[in-house]
Image (cartoon, rainbow, N blue to C red):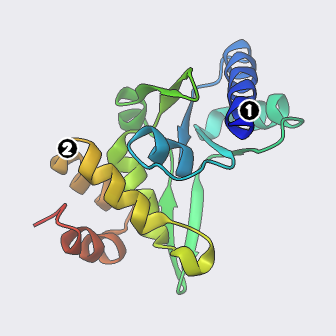
Amino acid sequence: MQDNANLALTLRKVKDKLKEADVHWAVFAGAAAHCYGSKRKVTDIDILVKSSDFEKAKAVLKNIPKVDVVADLEIVIDGKTYLFFMDEEMEEKLQHRKLFGVDVPVIPVEDNIIFKAILQRTEKQGKHDIEDIFCMITSERIDVEYLRRKIRKYHAEKRVEPLLVRLGVLL
């Protein structure tokens, strides 16, 4: 429980600093999966920002441990590059959820599912992407049209769709 209390303090600090800097942001990855139904332990906080806010966010969060801030991710898997970024459509669909008692913006569940489905890391790699996807799809209502549109936008159809079909998200 002490870890959660420390992460709550960290989240409050992140929230205050990003608000003060007028940065648009959201929690994503494992912490977002936790907000959407995953019960596994959260060890760090991943923050996604728009590319225009990246330098500002990096500067105000530079001395805060266990926080990673990113924008415009390029994820390379088997020689193929997949994009992941905060666009206006994602920003409009941000959810506000409690994470360790702190109200935070969280990327839409569909975008977090896509992010995790691009990575597809398993426990062998010390990660839980597929487990997180399963928790999210069983706990949340999924906007399949938005999901399909965003998969195309991230150019991830060949990587993501077979997994999501196997998990019953896409037919």
Q: Residue at x 41, y 64 (%)?
A: 131
- Which secondary structure lies at badge 2? loop
Dot 1 surroundings within 10 Å: few (below 14), some, or many (20 or more)? many
* Label 1 to label 2: alpha-carbon separation: 30 Å
Residue type beneath disc 2: Asp
* 17 on left or right of 30: right
x, y percentage for residue 98? Answer: 49, 25
Residue marked by disc 1: 57
Q: Earlier in the sequence, mark 1 or mark 2?
A: 1
Give residue 52's quadrant in the image. top right
Which quarter of the rendered picture does the C terminus lie within? bottom left
**Whether residue 157 is situated above or below residue 78 in the rendered picture:** above
Element marked by disc 1: helix
**Callout 1, which amino acid?**
Ala
Residue 153 seen by the camera: no
Q: Give me the residue at 67% from left, 35% from top.
A: 4
Residue at image mark 2 = 143
Q: Residue at x 43, y 31 (%)?
A: 91
Query: Which of the 4 quarters of the picture holds residue 166?
Result: bottom left
On the image, the x and y values in percent for residue 18 come to: 70, 22
